[in-house]
Image (cartoon, rainbow, N blue to C red):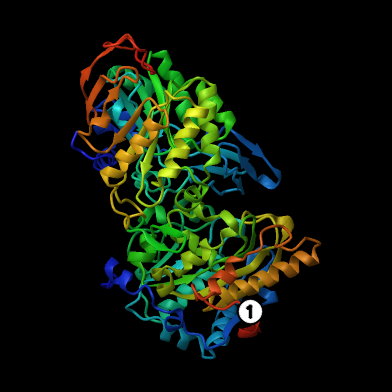
């Protein structure tokens, strides 16, 4: 199936496209927190339960039946990238049960297997997290940026100048973002916005000053803004201290999945959850720890307009 | 010599070391490319919870498990810090030492020049950004261990090994071991660097290096912050340290229109050099060409370079040069005593050499430099 690839010139021309025209939320951004106590059977994650949580999250986000939502958002013309987060290995990466539940819904919406790419920074990260690499085109593909390479062009906004993953830029026309809810030793926390560091060639350059404004600037790059359709945050296991690597002593089974179209609203809520958990466990706030995630507010400002961090404009729905 | 540095790098990088060195890297070595082995880094502290603090450059990155430092080529794995580029050259070539540029170091000799990917700053005007701003996964590299670097340099009659193109600070372990191996073959070593390095690793390097060229990118913290993502002060400290260690040092200053070409700034810098480093430190004012993320700035007018050159001489520096302007008279070395040409150059070629045992053949005045291997 032919995919209409955007030309680099076309991307440059469309750089000012406002986020509101490419997302699907209403004036108020919704963040759905779907939780199920039966999501675990011992050490295993119950995939049926995950599927129900995902469907419930989508239905509450769009106020429509899940299958209808998927059919509206995606079609057989799409190539969809599923950007997972596999830095922390098998015990603390995006659960495959979430990914496969989305793959199933995409297939029902008419997206061919070969038009779905599960992707992260490196093949090694994916393998460590238990994902099976798949580069052939007759199945759901799964590989890292090191397999696909990066654009020659440098994409710039504000403080950043980066080459983009060819997976994001050339191979997909839509992306579903799968961050993991966790603390981050430099940026304060990592959620939907920071997960796109895995789509650029030089994230190591952008960890100064708690990632502010770099994380916001990366999310302002046109291909990321245009292609990002949905965010599902894996909070089956979450972590409030010691991230990004897995630190079991500071993690907890939240048994939740967060869903949003607005990555800023999602990150604001993730921040709230982490702060609450830190306080509960006697840890100082992220601000006191010198790593307040100020990049969230920056992503919401007039220069970025990636979403809203205003609690009054965020509708949190717990299901 | 008409080939540009950029084109050369592209060719060297794409063709790989094997081509550039005309078969001197064995097939076996080439087959080992990207074999993925790790080398434990030097200069770091282990912290709690599998974190580490890198003490190589002034950034002092604190790095979580499975993360990398700012340079992108040093990674924390389970609380141990590794260099991902030790023995992994992405570029290798034989260059005239004048191309580094080092004008007062074994003139007319060749330097076996190597680089890995990675850099600890991010200059918006970087000429070699394709390797300096990349990660090891992006660029094909070849296994070229230190012993092979030294052996190839010797075999190809290179008087020195140059660590260049990218930023050698980030592959300091590889550089140190190659320089040490080189001395075993009677080959010297020169570091072509931004000077953004901590004291301890630099002092260690001084034990095995024979010359250092530092890119002093500006004389204001503003420039370093906005265009380099670094700081000026540590670079000045490195220059002072090199002086203290009696290391032969030359300075390159890339003159960028309206960014670092203010005559007052240039005068202040030259005065600092005279006062802190001495009047015999050569300074090369290089012409800027639009590159990387600074494509909206025009090339430096030659007149601006001439002004900078004159400011250096007026400030008391004995050896000032203009670079990237082939054929300019300021490419040549003049005796500070009698004013006669000591070494005449066109581009990287020496067309006349009036140096006699390190002295001006016209008046006998000693000319500062390293003239004999």
Classify residue A14 by image quadrant: bottom left
Residue A63 location, x and y as percent? 54, 90
User: Where A204 sits versus B359, above or below?
Assistant: below
Q: Is the N terminus of chain A in the top left, top right, bottom left or bottom right quadrant?
A: bottom left
Classify residue B35 by image quadrant: top left
* Residue drawn where x is 70% and y is 75% of the image: A37
User: Where B127 sits versus B368, above or below?
Assistant: below
Which residue is under mark 1? A34
SS type, badge 1: strand
Q: Nearer the viewer, residue B96 or B312?
A: B312
Residue B347 location, x and y as percent? 22, 31
* Residue drawn where x is 47% and y is 45% of the image: B121
Residue B325 location, x and y as percent? 24, 38
Q: Is the C terminus of chain A in the top left, top right, bottom left or bottom right quadrant?
A: bottom right
User: Where B214 sits versus B221, above or below?
Assistant: above
Q: Nearer the viewer, residue B118 or A82?
A: B118
């Amino acid at each position: 199936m032919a995919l209409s690839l955007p030309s680099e010139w076309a991307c440059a021309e469309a750089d000012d496209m406002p986020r509101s025209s490419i997302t699907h939320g209403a004036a108020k951004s919704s963040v759905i927190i779907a939780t199920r106590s039966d999501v675990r059977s011992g050490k295993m994650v119950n995939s049926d339960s995950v599927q129900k949580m995902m469907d419930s999250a989508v239905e509450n986000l769009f106020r429509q039946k899940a299958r209808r939502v998927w059919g509206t958002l995606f079609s057989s013309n799409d190539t969809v990238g599923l950007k997972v987060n596999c830095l922390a290995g098998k015990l603390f990466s995006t659960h495959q049960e979430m990914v496969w539940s989305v793959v199933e819904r995409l297939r029902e919406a008419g997206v061919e297997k070969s038009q779905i790419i599960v992707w992260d920074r490196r093949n090694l990260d994916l393998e460590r997290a238990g994902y099976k690499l798949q580069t052939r085109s007759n199945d759901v593909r799964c590989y890292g940026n090191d397999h696909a390479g990066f654009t020659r062009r440098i994409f710039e906004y504000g403080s950043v100048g980066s080459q983009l993953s060819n997976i994001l830029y050339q191979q997909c026309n839509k992306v579903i973002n799968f961050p993991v809810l966790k603390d981050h030793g430099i940026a304060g926390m990592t959620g939907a916005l920071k997960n796109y560091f895995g789509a650029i060639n030089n994230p190591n350059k952008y960890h100064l000053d708690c990632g502010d404004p770099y994380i916001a600037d990366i999310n302002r790059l046109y291909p990321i803004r245009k292609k990002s359709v949905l965010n599902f945050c894996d909070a089956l296991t979450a972590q409030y201290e010691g991230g990004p690597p897995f630190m079991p002593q500071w993690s907890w089974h939240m048994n939740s999945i967060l869903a949003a179209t607005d990555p800023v609203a999602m990150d604001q809520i993730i921040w709230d959850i982490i702060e609450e958990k830190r306080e509960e466990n006697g840890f100082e706030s992220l601000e006191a720890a010198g790593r307040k995630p100020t990049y969230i507010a920056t992503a919401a400002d007039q220069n970025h307009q990636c979403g809203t961090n205003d609690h009054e404009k965020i509708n949190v729905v717990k299901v | 010599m008409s080939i540009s540095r950029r084109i050369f790098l592209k060719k060297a990088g794409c063709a790989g070391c094997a081509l550039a060195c005309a078969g001197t890297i064995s097939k076996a070595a080439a087959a080992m490319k990207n074999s993925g082995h790790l080398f434990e880094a030097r200069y770091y502290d282990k912290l709690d919870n599998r974190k580490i603090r890198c003490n190589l450059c002034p950034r002092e990155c604190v790095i979580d498990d499975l993360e990398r430092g700012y340079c992108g080529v040093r990674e924390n794995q389970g609380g141990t810090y590794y260099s991902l580029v030790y023995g992994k050259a992405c570029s290798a070539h034989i260059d005239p030492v004048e191309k580094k540029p080092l004008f007062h170091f074994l003139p007319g000799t060749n330097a076996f020049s190597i680089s890995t990917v990675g850099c600890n700053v991010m200059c918006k005007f970087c000429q070699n950004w394709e390797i300096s701003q990349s990660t090891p996964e992006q660029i094909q590299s070849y296994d070229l261990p230190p012993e092979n670097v030294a052996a190839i340099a010797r075999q190809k009659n290179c008087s020195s090994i140059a660590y260049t193109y990218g930023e050698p600070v980030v592959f300091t372990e590889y550089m140190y071991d190659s320089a040490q191996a080189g001395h075993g073959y009677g080959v010297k070593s020169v570091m072509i660097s931004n000077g953004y390095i901590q004291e301890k690793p630099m002092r260690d390097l001084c034990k095995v290096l024979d010359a250092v060229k530092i890119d002093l990118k500006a004389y204001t913290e503003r420039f370093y912050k906005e265009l380099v993502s670094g700081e000026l002060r540590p670079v000045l400290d490195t220059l002072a340290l090199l002086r203290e260690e009696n290391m032969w040092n030359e300075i390159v200053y890339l003159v960028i229109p309206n960014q670092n070409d203010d005559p007052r700034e240039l005068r202040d810098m030259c005065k600092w050099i005279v006062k802190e480093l001495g009047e015999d430190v050569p300074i090369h004012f290089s012409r800027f060409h639009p590159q990387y993320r600074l494509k909206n700035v025009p090339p430096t007018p030659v007149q601006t370079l001439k002004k900078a050159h004159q400011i250096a001489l007026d400030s008391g520096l004995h050896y000032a040069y203009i670079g990237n302007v082939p054929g300019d008279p300021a490419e040549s070395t003049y005796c500070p005593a009698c004013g006669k040409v000591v070494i005449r150059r066109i581009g990287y070629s020496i067309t006349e050499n009036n140096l006699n045992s390190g002295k001006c053949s016209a008046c006998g005045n000693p000319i500062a430099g390293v003239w004999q291997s």
